[in-house]
Image: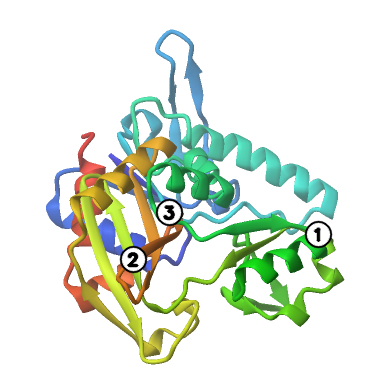
Amino acid sequence: MVLVVTGTDDVTADAVIAELNRRGRCEVARVNPGGFPRDVGMSASFDPESGRWTGPITTPGRQFDLADVRSVYWRRPTPSMFPGLDDEAAEFAKAQAREGFGGVLSALPNARYVNHPHRNWAAEYKPSQLSVAAELGFDVPPTLITADPAAARAFADKHAPIIYKPLRVTALMRDGRPQAIWTQRVEPDELDDSIAGTAHLFQAEVAEKVADLRVTVVGDEVFCVRIESSVARLDWRSDYDTLSYKMVELSAKMVEQMQHYLRRFGLMFGCFDFAVDSRGVPYFLECNPNGQWAWMELPTGLPMTAAFADALEGNL
């Protein structure tokens, strides 16, 4: 069985599930930890002799046993919610659900994970990403992480123009609406004392940037898409309507570097982002261990869904 762990609405997971079902080589179960314990049930028993967790998982549509799971596609699950409890009790219940239900799903010793949630979390730390990327020979822009306004101004004096981007993407609401924080250029007069409020990541802007590369690596498959915009943008995610996509080949050295990178973090899958300058030099920006990729499949014809199905079937 392949277990897909994700939220209720996830078109990317839908595509992978449909491909697995089309092939008919394995059973596929889908579960969202956010439904536990109201709509999703679990009774997991641990056998010290075998070192395995077994027991039923029940969803509104089916029941299966943990012992049958051989591959796990950990996509984008939502957390359990407890609206009937006060804030403190709800936080306690949420933590118990995460550690209990989520903990069991991440502790199946015979399963292949794409990717393991603990590996995802560790691989999202940008300081580690940049250190490993530079160690493996990627070109990396000079970077500063600080809460010191004077240090930020000194960095800008040396490396201007500079950009700011968040260290980790989190849910940000303003007036009840979700907000996105794109990579953006920071002007010198914006480097004020508000920087002292928390950690900020500043980076030298890649000079004469002409395009971006989004490279999706899953197992042994590498899919590189060159992204260009009709409008000069620091962050292509800010306006998808201006983008064009083209499949490109990478050097064997660059492919090897990315595979080494994933192995360092214990990942089977990652989405790498590079900025390409006018000389054709790609600069490593980040690697999202749970990045989006499905929207590029149609305009490029790249068989990404099939590659994910192959990776999940590989342990069956």
> Residue at label 1?
148
**Image position of 245 with respect to 121: above or below:** below
Viewer-closest of 121 and 19: 121
* Amino acid at dot 2: Val
Q: Can residue 181 be seen in this snapshot?
A: no
Helix, strand or loop status at disc 2: loop
For the image, the number of numbered tags is: 3
Closer to the chain start, of discs 1 and 3, is 3
Q: Residues within 10 Å of mark 2 (few under 14, many from 20)?
A: some
Viewer-closest of 36 and 69: 69
Q: Position of residue 316 (x, y in %)?
A: 21, 34
Mark 3–mark 2 CB contact (< 8 Å): no
Helix, strand or loop status at disc 3: loop
Q: Can residue 288 be seen in this snapshot?
A: yes
Q: Quadrant of residue 115?
A: top left
> Residue at label 2?
281
- Left or right, 254 with reference to 203: left
> Residue at label 3?
75
* Amino acid at dot 3: Arg
Helix, strand or loop status at disc 1: loop
